[in-house]
Image: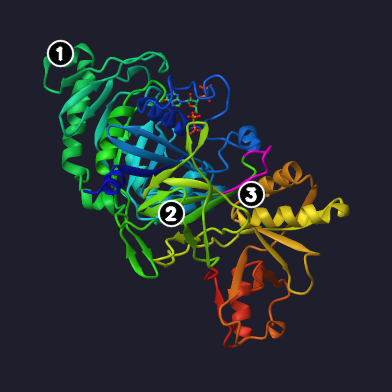
Amino acid sequence: MADYTREIEKRRTFAIISHPDAGKTTLTEKFLLYGGAINLAGSVKGKATSRHAVSDWMEIEKERGISVTSSVLQFNYGGYCINILDTPGHQDFSEDTYRTLMAADSAVMVIDGSKGVEAQTRKLFKVCVMRHIPIFTFINKMDRDANDTFDLLDEIEKELGIATCPINWPIGSGKNFRGVYDRDTRKVLVFSDTQKGTKEGIEEEIPVDDPHLLDVVSLEQKETLEEEIELLDGAAAEFDQEKVSKGELSPVFFGSALTNFGVETFLKHFLAMTSSPLPRTADCGVVDPMTEEFSAFVFKIQANMNKNHRDRIAFMRICSGRFDAGMEVYHVQGDKKMRLLQPQQMMADDRHVVDEAYAGDIIGVFDPGIFSIGDTICMPSRKFAYEGIPTFAPEHFARVAQLDTMKRKQFVKGINQIAQEGAIQIFQEAKGGMEEIIVGVVGVLQFDVLKYRLENEYNVEIRLDMLPYEYIRWIGNRDQVDVDKIIGTSDMKKVMDLKGRPLLLFVNSWSVGMTLDRNEGLVLEEFSKN
Ligand code: G4P
């Protein structure tokens, strides 16, 4: 096996997704701890002492305690090279989560055992299921009183439409939490209090039929466990690797990230069950990650990660071959040969320049404003384009009024840059230039981000006037339609997107139907095709 294929083989790239406060940051830190990437979990910028997470970049995230943007971390464990993609923990950023999932080969869903599937995260988790990649569930905080285990699984199945397969099973919860039973080895991994993870736990495993088990669990707990095992073996879905790989069955694990319990067991099983980098579809067919030629696609653009540098970074997922910092590559959408500038990788809270990287890895490169989300980078000798990343239709619209008209230039620059990053979509009145700008977002929190960033990064104050539109339609057959002549309902608005394509905004679905009735031959589409 060539050296580069060995490197690709050991890559595991996954996204981690959760409701805010379910324990994603804590779990990630414990992973890093096992990987030796940090010394003591929690000591990365002291999540335990201050509210800053390793991967939280923006002030607004700290204020609201949610991750707005996604970040990437790499570490090694057990012969694997692991890339973790963090995702925002709020449904308003589900589009960002979807893009991040495009760069991942599997996903880990962290659920708070006392809360189950929470309302705010339902949409994010559904987006996860939509990608058809393997999904692993970690039910956290078992050291606190948790919901009934069968109810938790039921909820995941019903809410998300995915079957579950518990790999282990908790014995009690909260004060009565005694450990987890491994269904495969039929052994109980005994819970030991690590004093919030500051101490190393004692790893003790007791076979379920060993009389010593009664030293750690009560007779009642043992009997309940036996009943539950019987029920499980009869009723729960059996582990089926193929179904897991297709994202139809989610292996479920229980533990407590804070106390380090069940984290390593989860990591080990997960790494064995998930796959090395997956092949991806391009316009030339399916691209094998093991092919020698380098290729990647841009899934995220982030400006001003470092306020002092006013930089803009394009994050790309390497899909095939080996990347070498000096190599000449080809940017398909820009139709240009180039060298990628300052390629870097993240490691805990550190960024460092990379000389080489492999399929499965994520690199951030300096972007002078040429990349867009979904762009393909490949070798000049083998040109092709990966399938694009769909744009979600915005569901909330607002008119942007700039308060200080002297700052027009900064305003236009700022709003355009933020739109290029994919955080918002901007539209103009069908007639008239940038005089009136309408912003569309998938979740209302994105309005806050826009306002905050324009003020803090571009020094521009704005006012947002909410508009009643909820439906947006692109005109599918715009070559055959004179937009000026479209007869709509009185509440319909004609606008244009950044590429000059005409769009219609509607207040309700009735108006959409009415407009279709009134204009024979008009084709309206919910998504932009490119
Ligand atoms: P998030 O990234 O998903 O938002 O969650 P995060 O890890 O920040 O965890 C949220 C809170 O839940 C933190 O407490 C954290 O310590 C706690 N937590 C995480 N895992 C567990 C667990 O397994 N058991 C228990 N009991 N608590 C857990 P906090 O008080 O908000 O912050 P901190 O002061 O402890 O850092």
Mark in front: 1 vs 2: 2
Mark in front: 3 vs 1: 3
Q: Residue at image x 41%, y 44%? A: 356
Mark in front: 2 vs 3: 2
Q: Along the line of sight, which residue is nearer the eye, 182 or 327?
A: 327
The boundaries of the magenta stretch are: 306-313
Disc 1 target residue: 212
Q: Along the line of sight, which residue is nearer the eye, 116 or 28?
A: 28
Q: Along the line of sight, which residue is nearer the eye, 51 or 192?
A: 51
Q: How is the image coloured?
A: rainbow
- The residues bearing labels 2 and 3 have C-alpha atoms spaced at a distance of 21 Å
- The residues bearing labels 3 and 1 have C-alpha atoms spaced at a distance of 55 Å
Amino acid carrying mark 1 in the image:
His
Q: Main secondary structure of the magenta part?
A: loop
Q: Which mark is residue 446?
A: 3
Amino acid carrying mark 3 in the image:
Gln
- The residues bearing labels 1 and 2 have C-alpha atoms spaced at a distance of 47 Å
